[in-house]
Image (cartoon, rainbow, N blue to C red):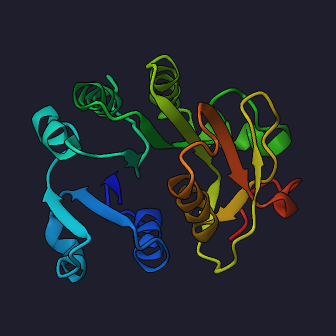
Amino acid sequence: MKNILILGANGQIARIVEERLLNEQLDVHLTLFLRQAIRLHELAADDRVTLIDGDIQDYDAVNTAMKGQDLVYLALVDHTPDNVLTKNIIKAMKANGVQRVVASSLLGLYNEVPGEYGRWNYQMVKSGLPAAIKADQLLANSGLDYTTLRFPWLNDRDEVKYTITHRHEPYLGVSGSRQSMADVIVMIIADFDYLKNDSVGIADADTQGETRPVY
């Protein structure tokens, strides 16, 4: 049984991940941590699910939820100025002997998005970029087995279609489906070594060359 902690468990991608894990990977127990846990009340009856009402900025709450976990998935981007979310997660993981973490982030951390789209994206995300860059650096230097997921601009298409680029490669594509992002996370949970100690870009390569998001 793999014990998976999802922080920010009511996010759109997180909910796709949760549904797929419960339907496809029967050997999991999900601890779903979110503000107002009642929002996931429909999962409460599943004995493979524990709901926790909490705030990721509350270290004690994160530390309590961390006990006995095998992998942590942060389902939101850490935009806090002092990166309290990432720092709380790292501290609690080390305190509880948890090694594997997957964190949501955004494209443009390394000026890796080329062309007009890269310039437009920077203007759109620059206010939150320093915190996202620092969160990635904290994870990379933590000694934990981490994966930073650099998501593109997202759409709600049903297709699972994406190309992965790695830290020192140009970002390929401008948009991708939430279903595709969830697929990568499900694959990591199936195999903890997949994309370990890497920062990866995920997008539909067919959208490469577009100057604005593809919805």
Instruction: Compare residues 203 and 51 and report the one nearer the observer.
Output: 51
Instruction: Compare residues 98 and 131 and report the one nearer the observer.
Output: 98
Q: Position of residue 123 (x, y in %)?
A: 63, 38
89 left or right, relative to 159: left
The vertical placement of 41 against 4, above or below, is: below
Residue 20, percent from left and from top:
48, 74
Q: Residue furthest top?
A: 141
Q: Residue at x 89, y 53 (%)?
A: 209
Q: Is residue 160 above or below residue 191?
A: below
Q: Quadrant of residue 160?
A: bottom right
For the point 26% across and 60% down, the residue is 32
- Image: 176 above or below 188: below
Image location (x, y in percent) of residue 155: 61, 69
Quarter of the image with the N terminus is bottom left
What is the x, y in percent for residue 143?
A: 46, 19
Name the quarter where the C terminus is drawn: bottom right
Residue 125 in the image: above or below residue 29: above
Task: Please tell me how many numbered marks the rendered image carries.
Answer: 0
Viewer-side residue, 185 vs 79: 185
Q: Is residue 60 left or right of residue 24?
A: left
What residue is shown at x 83% (from left), y 37% (from top)?
114
Picture quarter containing residue 167? top right
Tell me which residue sits at (81%, 53%) in the image. Answer: 211
Place residue 180 in its image quadrant: bottom right
Position of 149 with respect to 10 (left or right) is right
